[in-house]
Image (tube, grey):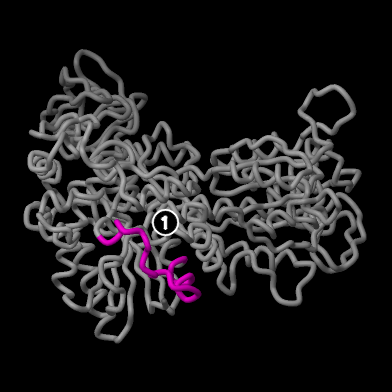
């Protein structure tokens, strides 16, 4: 059944207005123009009003729109009838709407209502769970032995199927981790208002035939968890889920009748989850929708060996993939700033002394000795007012006491018998710092995308910040492949796994969170199992990316993920696979350590930084004289291990072999030679990219 638009909603029962983040309200829409960004809504009233307006526009335009929410549309068998006296689940919605107080500011009385419903429904409970600080008559904190089943038939079906859906929480649980009961109560009231506003233009699946212009159905967002990371676009998991669900349902709805009526007899009174029966097809459809023309890993038509410039342009399409939160300044070093930060207070907050000396009001000075007051101004202590014509002892950093606008350095004055005599009269205002001369309140301080350095933290603290908005650390999984690879120190003649500790250390040096996946043998199933356990935002593998009999990465990606097998016009590093696994970008690096390091530093790094929220940061470099000679053919970019000599010229390692790991320790950067043929002689200008500029110094 085709829809012109699909809107997915991640609901929340949180009290109060919310800012964008986890466990708040998000929507996303997929339509003929493509997949839109995730939209945050601060309250349930706000999102309900937005949904009503969006649905009315669809009706006015003659469009069909599917609205899906991740809440239960009914309760387990018998509960609705026991409460309302009718088997009609939509009557339950209206009953809840009449009794739930859900205010415009986002506060509500759902726990109190649940307690009142417990008193009416037969047996113990069934509702349970509340904040420890809240005393609600009739609502226990622990799970009771209720009369009603914990799950509907729909949840029973998902539990039996297993997979990404996992084990849903019971609709009776209102609080604690993963609870869904509160969302269901508040959503029923909102959906009642939605139906009331739209009338016959709205149908609720599966309670009504889905032939109205607006169809509302329930979904379980965990069904798209295998691919949601690819859809986050800088937001939290909730944002990725609604975008993936909207994209997947719209694509799948064009291929099959996703709103066929379920054949379970309880669906008509309990509701049903749209997605049961096509749990695998839904994430596959979302994954396919995530690869529009111009996808960041799409190989340009007719290109075999991909030029480095083409590779960099396409990699630059990768966007931020992590959420954000607040971190104390003590924990913020190396994190990526999520939003622009302005000064909360002036620095310095008050005018103060720049030197140790004597403070006074310049206009009140008279010739001769100057009387000294007994007050003494020191940093952190306010001095007493200084009378006109008098001076007071003042130390560096001390706030200027009342009556002081100028400071004479102590070496320009002599003190005797309670007076000072100036040997050099300073100009008015000398040796003082004005309030806010560094930054004033509201001045821009740090820009979003900044990778926070110790100096940035000092500036933030001085401007009044104790916490900073930062991106979650990008989780980067690292996996080594190959039968020949053994752990360091293993007896025998195996090849020690030099790549994994090197790559993990690079990830950590860039402020990201390394995830060690260990080493896997040359076996497709073992490789797939290791990748499935990554649990990361991005995956980096080394080895197995070429076309040999034991190189399985590209084949596994092609069969179970997505891949374009790149052959990059670069030395070292030509065999490199790029793709996605469960929605996470995967960088398949060559197995030789030098090639793996080069590709990781020059190609993977800027893409990972973009995913981490730091923006696109390709390597730059600077021009230095060559301290070597080389003739290079046309056709590929070359990167030579290099270091600067005492005169600032670049010398290169004696061997270009990509297995010569010692050259990495010898070097402190790369010399980059262009795609064209070039002959380099000592003294010629060459481009040098330091390891320090790559965050590896």
| Residue ID for mark 1 | 241
Q: Nearer the viewer, residue 599 or 78?
A: 78
Q: Is residue 646 something that shows in the picture?
A: no
Which residue appears at 80% of the width and 63% of the height?
Answer: 569
Query: Residue 289: within the magenta?
Result: no
Disc 1 residue crowd, few under 14, some 14–19, many 20+, Cα 10 Å: many
Give the vertical position of 61 relative to 266 (above or below): below
Give the vertical position of 488 relative to 112 (above or below): above
**Image location of residue 623, percent across then percent down:** 73, 57
Q: Is residue 243 left or right of residue 398?
A: right
Which of the 4 image quarters holds residue 559?
bottom right
- Quadrant location of the C terminus? top right
Which residue appears at 65% of the width and 41% of the height?
Answer: 530
Secondary structure category for the residue under label 1: helix
How many numbered marks appear?
1
Q: Give the prevailing secondary structure in the magenta stretch.
A: loop
Query: Residue 260: within the magenta?
Result: yes
**Image location of residue 246, percent across then percent down:** 41, 66
Q: Nearer the viewer, residue 3 or 434?
A: 3
Which residue appears at 64% of the width and 60% of the height?
Answer: 562
Which residue appears at 80% of the width and 50% of the height?
Answer: 551
**Image location of residue 67, percent across then percent down:** 31, 68
- Quadrant location of the N terminus? bottom left
Magenta-tinted stretch: 248-268
**Image location of residue 464, percent across then percent down:** 29, 39
Q: Nearer the viewer, residue 179 or 205?
A: 205
Q: Is residue 41 left or right of residue 412?
A: left
């Amino acid at each position: 059944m085709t829809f012109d638009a699909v809107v997915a909603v991640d609901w929340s029962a949180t009290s109060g207005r919310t800012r964008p983040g986890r466990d708040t309200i998000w929507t996303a829409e997929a339509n003929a123009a493509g997949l839109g960004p995730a939209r945050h809504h601060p309250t349930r009233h706000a999102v309900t009003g937005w949904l009503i307006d969006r649905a009315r526009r669809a009706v006015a335009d003659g469009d069909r729109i599917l609205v899906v929410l991740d809440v239960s549309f009914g309760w387990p068998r018998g509960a609705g009838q026991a409460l309302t006296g009718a088997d009609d689940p939509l009557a339950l919605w209206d009953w809840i709407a009449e009794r739930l107080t859900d205010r415009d500011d986002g506060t509500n009385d759902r726990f109190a209502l649940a307690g009142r419903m417990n008193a009416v429904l037969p047996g113990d409970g069934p509702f349970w769970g509340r904040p420890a600080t809240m005393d609600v008559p009739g609502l226990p904190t622990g799970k009771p032995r209720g009369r009603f089943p914990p799950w509907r038939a729909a949840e029973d079906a998902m539990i039996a199927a297993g997979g990404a859906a996992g084990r849903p929480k019971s609709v009776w649980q209102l609080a604690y981790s993963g609870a869904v009961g509160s969302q269901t109560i508040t959503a029923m009231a909102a959906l009642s208002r939605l139906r009331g506003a739209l009338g016959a233009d709205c149908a609720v699946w599966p309670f009504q035939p889905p032939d109205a212009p607006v169809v509302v159905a329930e979904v379980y967002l965990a069904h798209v968890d295998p691919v949601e990371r690819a859809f986050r676009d800088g937001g939290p998991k909730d944002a990725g889920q609604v975008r993936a669900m909207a994209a997947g349902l719209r694509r799948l709805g064009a291929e099959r009748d996703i709103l066929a009526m379920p054949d379970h007899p309880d669906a008509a009174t309990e509701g049903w989850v749209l997605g049961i029966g096509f749990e695998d097809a839904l994430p596959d459809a979302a994954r396919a929708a995530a690869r529009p023309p111009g996808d960041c890993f799409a190989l340009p038509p007719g290109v075999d060996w991909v030029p480095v410039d083409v590779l960099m342009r396409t990699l630059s399409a990768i966007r931020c993939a992590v959420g954000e939160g607040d971190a104390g300044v003590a924990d913020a070093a190396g994190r990526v700033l999520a939003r622009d930060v302005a000064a909360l207070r002036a620095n310095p907050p008050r005018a103060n002394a720049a030197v140790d000396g004597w403070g006074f009001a310049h206009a009140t000075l008279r010739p001769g000795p100057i009387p000294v007051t007994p007050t003494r101004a020191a940093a952190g202590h306010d001095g007493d007012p200084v009378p006109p014509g008098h001076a007071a002892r003042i130390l560096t950093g001390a706030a200027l006491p009342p009556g002081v606008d100028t400071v004479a350095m102590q070496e320009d004055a002599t003190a005797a018998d309670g007076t000072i005599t100036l040997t050099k009269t300073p100009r008015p205002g000398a040796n003082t710092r004005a309030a806010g001369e560094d930054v004033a309140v509201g001045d821009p301080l740090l820009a979003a995308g900044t990778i926070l350095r110790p100096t940035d933290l000092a500036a933030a603290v001085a401007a009044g910040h104790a916490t900073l908005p930062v991106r979650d650390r990008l989780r980067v999984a690292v996996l080594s492949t190959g039968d020949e690879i053994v752990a360091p120190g293993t007896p025998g003649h195996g090849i020690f796994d030099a790549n994994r500790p090197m790559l993990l250390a690079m990830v950590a040096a860039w402020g990201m969170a390394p995830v060690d996946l260990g080493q896997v043998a040359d076996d497709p199933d073992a490789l797939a199992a290791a990748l499935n356990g990554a649990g990361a935002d991005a995956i980096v593998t080394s080895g197995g990316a070429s076309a040999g009999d034991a190189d399985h990465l590209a084949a596994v990606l092609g069969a179970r993920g997505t891949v374009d097998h790149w052959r990059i016009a670069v030395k070292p590093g030509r065999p490199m696979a790029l793709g996605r696994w469960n929605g996470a970008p995967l960088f398949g690096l060559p197995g030789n350590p030098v090639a793996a390091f080069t590709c990781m530093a020059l190609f993977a790094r800027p893409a990972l930084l973009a995913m981490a929220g730091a923006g696109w940061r390709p390597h730059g470099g600077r021009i230095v004289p060559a301290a070597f000679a080389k003739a290079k053919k046309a056709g590929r970019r070359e990167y030579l291990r290099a270091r600067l000599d005492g005169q600032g010229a670049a010398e290169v390692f004696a061997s270009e072999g990509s297995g010569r790991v010692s050259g990495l320790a010898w070097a402190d950067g790369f010399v980059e030679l262009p795609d064209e043929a070039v002959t380099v002689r000592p003294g010629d200008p060459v481009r040098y990219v330091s390891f320090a500029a790559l965050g590896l110094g």
